[in-house]
């Protein structure tokens, strides 16, 4: 009988528990100082067994160093605390983490599968990215509350491996100095990623694809759907370059561009003027965009963007225009929108 792909790569169902309270009878007990030591030890233990789960029981855990996941390990809390509910799990950065990330999903030896995180808070007052992903496929990040962060909440960086099938769903991103979610393919391709039903509030940018890199890999088959992006300082959803087959569907964007009026956009697609790096085959359908009188354009197509569907959107209260299409953009279907 043929062995399926999942059977070949799935982790073992081993679980180890970590506790902040000896009364909870965790396999490892933290003391509230450098709790990354116990959390990393738990991850390393299940990694040596071929993968599994690390369960963080309720309470606050404090990181003084980055925690690295390099195998099929799922980190699970007992729920988001919403800044006060003691029934949940919170992981908090300390000053010792300055210049570092809270969690890194990366294995220098090879890409790995079936890892992720769920049901907890990441309160990143001192670190860089809350989660950095550099070598992962078939992964899920669900029901995580991100607050603060010098850079981004989740940063997916394809500088070493191709990556695919990463799901980010039902998370809350709040007060990010950078983006809630940032993805750069760099020298490798990143495909089939899903950003679904998340809530972004008071971040610099909601979702940004391909911000820095203008050569190398492509970003394809992304589904950005059902997100609420509210009170954003700059642009709500930004596609810079080398993006194709991207669906931006049924999102609600409100009060965009609060940092500087008449400067930023609700949804922007463009290549930054870099020849040969155009975005193409983009669907922008069924979104509701309230510019809050700050956003310059509700939807902006710029540079050499090609093959775009802009249908069924509702856009209003923008400082300049609800819709802008630069003269160099080609092959656009723009229909059945309500633009006021």
Image: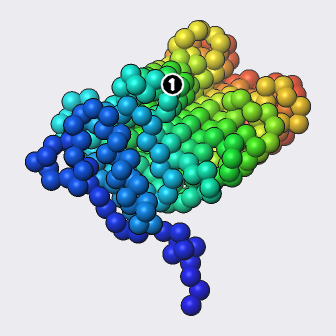
Please say if 326 is above or below 62.
Answer: above
State the colouring used for the structure image.
rainbow
| Residue drawn at 60 percent across, 23 percent down | 235
> Residue 194: x percent and y percent?
56, 49
Residue 67, image quadrant:
top left
Residue position marked by numbered label 1 in the rendering: 99
> Residue 57: x percent and y percent?
23, 48
Please say if 332 is above or below 294.
Answer: below
Q: Is 268 or 36 nearer to us in this picture? A: 36
Q: Is 232 or 91 nearer to us in this picture? A: 91
| Residue drawn at 41 percent across, 66 percent down | 49
SS category of the residue bearing label 1: loop
| Residue drawn at 67 percent across, 38 percent down | 184
Quarter occupied by the C terminus: top right
Residue 1, image quadrant:
bottom right
> Residue 217: x percent and y percent?
77, 45
Relative to 40, is 80 on the left or the right? left
Q: Is residue 69 visible?
A: yes
Residue 300, image quadrant:
top right
Count neighbours of disc 1 (C-alpha within 10 A) and say few if under 14, some if 14 to 19, many if 20 or more: few
| Residue drawn at 49 percent across, 57 percent down | 71
Q: Is 267 or 293 nearer to us in this picture? A: 267
Q: Is residue 229 visible?
A: no
Residue farthest toward the bottom in the current orientation of the protein: 1
> Residue 38: x percent and y percent?
31, 45
């Amino acid at each position: 009988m043929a062995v399926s792909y999942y059977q070949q790569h799935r982790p073992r169902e081993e679980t180890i528990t970590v506790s902040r309270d000896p009364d909870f009878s965790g396999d490892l007990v933290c003391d509230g100082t450098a709790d990354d030591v116990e959390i990393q030890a738990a991850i390393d233990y299940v990694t040596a067994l071929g993968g599994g789960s690390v369960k963080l029981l309720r309470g606050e855990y404090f990181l003084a160093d980055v925690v690295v996941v390099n195998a099929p390990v799922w980190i699970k809390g007992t729920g988001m605390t919403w800044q006060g509910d003691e029934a949940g799990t919170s992981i908090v950065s300390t000053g010792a983490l300055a210049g570092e990330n809270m969690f890194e999903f990366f294995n220098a030896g090879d890409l790995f599968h079936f890892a992720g995180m769920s049901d907890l808070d990441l309160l990143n007052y001192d670190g860089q990215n809350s989660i950095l992903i550099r070598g992962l496929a078939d992964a899920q990040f669900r029901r995580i509350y991100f607050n603060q962060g010098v850079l981004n909440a989740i940063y997916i960086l394809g500088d070493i491996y191709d990556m695919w099938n990463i799901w980010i769903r039902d998370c809350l991103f709040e007060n990010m100095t950078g983006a809630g979610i940032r993805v750069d393919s760099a020298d490798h391709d990143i495909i089939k990623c899903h950003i679904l039903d998340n809530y972004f509030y008071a971040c610099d940018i909601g979702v940004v694809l391909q911000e820095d890199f203008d050569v190398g890999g492509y970003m394809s088959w992304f589904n950005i759907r059902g997100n609420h992006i509210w009170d954003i300082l700059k642009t709500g959803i930004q596609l810079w370059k080398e993006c194709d087959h991207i669906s931006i569907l049924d999102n609600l964007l409100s009060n965009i561009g609060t940092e500087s009026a008449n400067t930023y956009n609700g949804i922007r697609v463009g290549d930054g003027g870099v020849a040969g790096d155009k975005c193409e085959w983009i669907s922008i359908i069924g979104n509701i965009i309230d510019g809050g009188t700050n956003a310059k354009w509700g939807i902006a197509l710029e540079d050499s963007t090609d093959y775009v569907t802009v249908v069924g959107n509702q856009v209003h209260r923008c400082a300049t225009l609800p819709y802008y299409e630069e003269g160099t953009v080609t092959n656009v279907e723009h229909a059945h929108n309500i633009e006021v």
